[in-house]
Image (cartoon, rainbow, N blue to C red):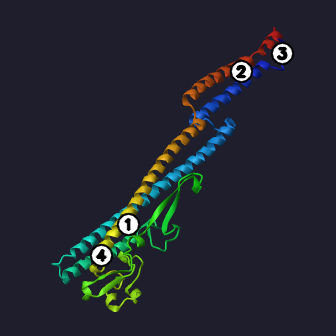
Amino acid sequence: MAIVINSNPTATSASSNLSKANDALRKSLARLSSGHRIVSPEDDAGGLAVAYKLNAQLNRNDVIRQNVQNGLSLLQVQDGALTVAGSIVDRISELRTMAEDVTKNAGDIENYSKEFIELQMQLSEVYREKFNGVDLFTSNKGGDGMNQDGNKFSYTLVTHDSGQLEDGSVSLNVVNLQGVLSLGGPDTRFHSAFNGVVDTVQGFNLGNISGANASSYTTIDQPHLSIFTSDGFISNLLSISIGQLTNIIEKIADARAENGAEQSRLMMVEDLLSSKMTNLEAAHGRIMDVDVALESSRLAKNNVLVQSSAAMVAQANNLTAIALTLLTG
């Protein structure tokens, strides 16, 4: 090869190799410091696009999982309220059974009725229970944000990241407490407190869930009107039958059973979402996460190449010095 002064292709080649090794070293440093295999789109444009969509799906599933957990909490609070309502009706049935005792006089029954009225007031408060401002119970009129299927009201919880109901959704029942606590009607029975007259309680509710008052019953004869308080609660324990209370207890049991079934389903949905998120995260990691062992090896190799390339560039730059030796010789 000719000895020249104006050009040094060996040094140029060594410099190019040094630049490539330096770029590779910087990329290894960036990957190891960030933990990402794809630092910029040029590293893997297609992989980055797939990882971006997987990450968005993963984030949506995480939020859906939170929604499911919130729905589960709503059902648990609702079941707690139903448990209290069941205990109240159970206690009312005990009072009604005790009122059957032939040794109890009118004063005793009146004392039982005082507790009976207070228990009805508590049922009315249970009906107004909410979860973060969302109604746990409803009446025959339904409420805002509820779906109605016949006389059944519910909230629809979307459980799929597509947002489409047909891909996944769960209906959370909003218990129609007016229907559950309905005494049925018209129901007619003998009322000993009115000296043998017949009383009629027409489709009334324990706890006055319908929000009625005594003036709403002007069609009932005045003596019969006295079976209601001014607030619309049934005033006398003997105005209802044990059969009616038994029927209410059965309806509360049915409502709790449906609540429990929905809780069980939501737990299964949460398990599915957890499994899906685990696999989505693994798929995303295979694309985006750096293999530390492999990249550490590359870092060591590139570090040696940079140092050796730098040394060779220095050596190549000295090749033209031979020409000076010839000229000065």
In this figure, which residue is indicated by the disc labeled 3? 4
Q: Amino acid at mark 4?
A: Ser
Identify the residue at image location x=43%, y=60%: 74
Q: Taking 110 as reference, is 273 left or right?
A: right
Going from N to C along the chain, the mark reached first, 4 or 2, is: 4
- C-alpha gap between disc 3 and disc 4: 119 Å
In this figure, which residue is indicated by the disc labeled 4? 241
Callout 1 secondary element? helix
In this figure, which residue is indicated by the disc labeled 1? 251
Q: Taking 108 as reference, is 83 left or right?
A: right
Q: Amino acid at mark 2?
A: Val
Identify the residue at image location x=40%, y=89%: 219
Identify the residue at image location x=45%, y=65%: 174
Select label 1 or label 2 by which is in front: 1
Q: How many neighbours does mark 2 have within 10 angstroms: few (below 14), some (14-19), or many (20 or more)? A: some
Going from N to C along the chain, the mark reached first, 1 or 2, is: 1
Question: Number of callouts in the render?
Answer: 4
Residue 228 can be seen in this image: no
Checking the image for residue 313, the label placed there is: 2
- C-alpha gap between disc 1 and disc 2: 90 Å
Single out the residue that lies furthest toward the left. Answer: 103
Tell me the quarter of the picture where residue 96 sits: bottom left
